[in-house]
Image (spheres, rainbow, N blue to C red):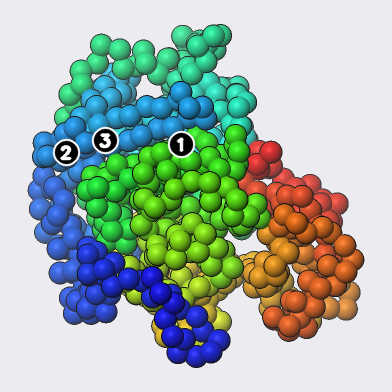
Amino acid sequence: MAESADPKPEVKYYTPDPSYRQNSWMGDYTWAYNEFLKDPEAFWAKIASKLYWYAPWEKVREWNYPYAKWFVGGKTNITYNCLDRHVLGKNRNKVALIWKGETDEEERVFTYRQLLREVNRFANGLRELGVGKGDRVCIYMPMIPEQVIAMLACARIGAVHSVVFGGYGAAALNQRIVGAGAKVVITADMAVRRGKSIPLKHVIEEAIINAPTVERLIVLRRETGRPVEIHSEMEMDFYEVTKDMSPECHPEVMDSEDPMFILYTSGTTGAPKGIVHTCGGYMVGVYYTTKYIFDLKESDVYWCTADPGWITGHSYVVYGPLAVGGTILISENTPDYPDPGIWWKMVEEYGVSILYTAPTAIRMFMKLGEEWPDKYNLNSLRILGSVGEPLNPEAFEWFYHVIGKDRCPIVDTWWQTETGMHMITTVLGEPMRPGYAGKSIPGVVVDVVDKDGKPVKPGESGLLVIKEPWPAMMRTVYNNDERYRKYWEAVPGCYLVGDLAIKGTDGNIMVIGRSDDLIVVAGHNIGTAEVESALVSHKAVAEAAVIGKPDPLKGNTIKAFVTLRVGHTPSDKLKNELIYHVRITLGPIAMPSEIEFMDSLPKTRSGKIVRRVLKAKEMGADPGDVSTLEE
């Protein structure tokens, strides 16, 4: 790939090799988007027709603002499309899933045939326990094959799974179990992290004390030396559930609008929201985006580093790639254990061709320099992806040059738990602009508007909104439909996503952070992401987080917490340099009043910086639940 000529001196683009567009499933972006605009329902019907349906839909879309139904009357089962369809076709013996543990000896491989048989056995076991269509099942497990098997088994029999990230503490877990009204909870005795065993069962035992709907606890016992005790009154061993079960299980025929899963996502205030996704529309959305945005091909080895406890893991570890028929890699490894080269070693060893990860991980590798990735052969990579938060220009450049070797397109995706699928990116073949996620993908209508719903001028910041329904959209907030309606009521005729964004004159969109992640300084709204990005653009800074501190004169002042790259040391001189750097980059109103150097920033295990912990520390307040934080 060659860097293209800049249309303006201050704007940089990278133009992919033309073969990416010519050989991709999507083809020409402008043509594809215009085809969608001509007839949106025909566009989505064409995508959906590539999947198997027991009965065809009567209507592609039914839109009664703010409620949508997709593929109305259609009957399907997502696991048939993820498993049976490939086993009955040519991919029976193709590798579906590779799991890599923390040591060289820990590896498990499942073909599509083997994975289907394991899913069927566990699905039959759940049916034997009385779990059926519409029952809620909570899954609280580490990133191991049984987690994926449990999810697919639930979907197989029409049970609604609610996956909870294995890092949550008992109180947060109880909140989600009770909120969903789970009948069965599936867990493991432990997770493994950086060579240590992290007990899980005692967390579950505490979490279900005041969870009256729970009838059974299924425990996968990984510890072979001293297996945890199973209390037979309520508990069962994971493999006892599958013992003597048939490897054949007829999938439940599901209506397109039947609930498929509930996934809880934390709000900025109040209780977590149980986002409800349904069978047909979600299936079509994740199949489409995995195939056409990632351009997943028969020969690809695809690695999304997310955990299925988050929506990225649902859509782009499990359901999307398996629906397309890909070979997926999952791992319990952390990116810096046993050393910071482990990810790049795995890319070389397994021939990973598509890598989808988070900006936090990219910035961590930036901090450590080029030494570790340069030890390994990364030539198998052909596409890089980013997810979870805005990819700042400096991280884009490092990812592109150091990992992609100036040849791999970067698919910087914006979407959220509520959307279920990608909404904004730069599709393969289109010029990439660092700092800008891209444009609405074909099938989606996104814009940047003011509070009255009117598009802002190019270059101005505004509210990111979605103007038309899409198949994978959430249908409601579980047991709280009023909360769902608020998404559609804040801006006339639009779905308000809660992010601020800038739309460039070229149509590309830069997402600059949550609209509620604002610091009001002397009457000016300052986005935390803008200040953080300005700090990270300095050569010495690896990561940054900023908070607002109450000030009697300005309302708030800005305090920054900064970690440095290798080779740089904290000093008063560097503090002054950074403050000046922000002044030059964003202007005097955005200058931090204080900078504190730290060895690391508080993060969830999924890699998101938790500013509320920094704020609580600064104000001497209780930081709240910190059970999900990285050690």
The circle drawn on residue 331 is 1
Q: Report x, y in % for residue 233.
A: 47, 10
Q: Is residue 40 above or below residue 108?
A: below
Mark with earlier residue (3, 1): 3
Which kind of residue does numbered mark 1 sit on? Ser
The residue beneath circle 2 is 91
Q: Residues within 10 Å of mark 1 (few under 14, many from 20)?
A: many
Q: Is residue 608 visible?
A: no
Q: Report x, y in % for residue 229.
A: 54, 9
Q: Secondary structure at mark 1?
A: strand
**Quadrant holding the N terminus:** bottom left
Task: Please report the residue visible at 45 percent of the width from the left and 59 percent of the height from the top.
Answer: 404
Q: Is residue 376 visible?
A: yes
Q: Is residue 187 above or below residue 589?
A: above
**C-alpha separation, residue under disc 2 versus residue under disc 3:** 8 Å
**C-alpha separation, residue under disc 3 versus residue under disc 1:** 16 Å
Quarter where residue 549 is shown: bottom right
**Quadrant holding the C terminus:** top right
The residue beneath circle 3 is 95
In the image, 490 versus 403, the foreground residue is 403
Q: Is residue 252 left or right of residue 631?
A: left
Q: Secondary structure at mark 2?
A: loop
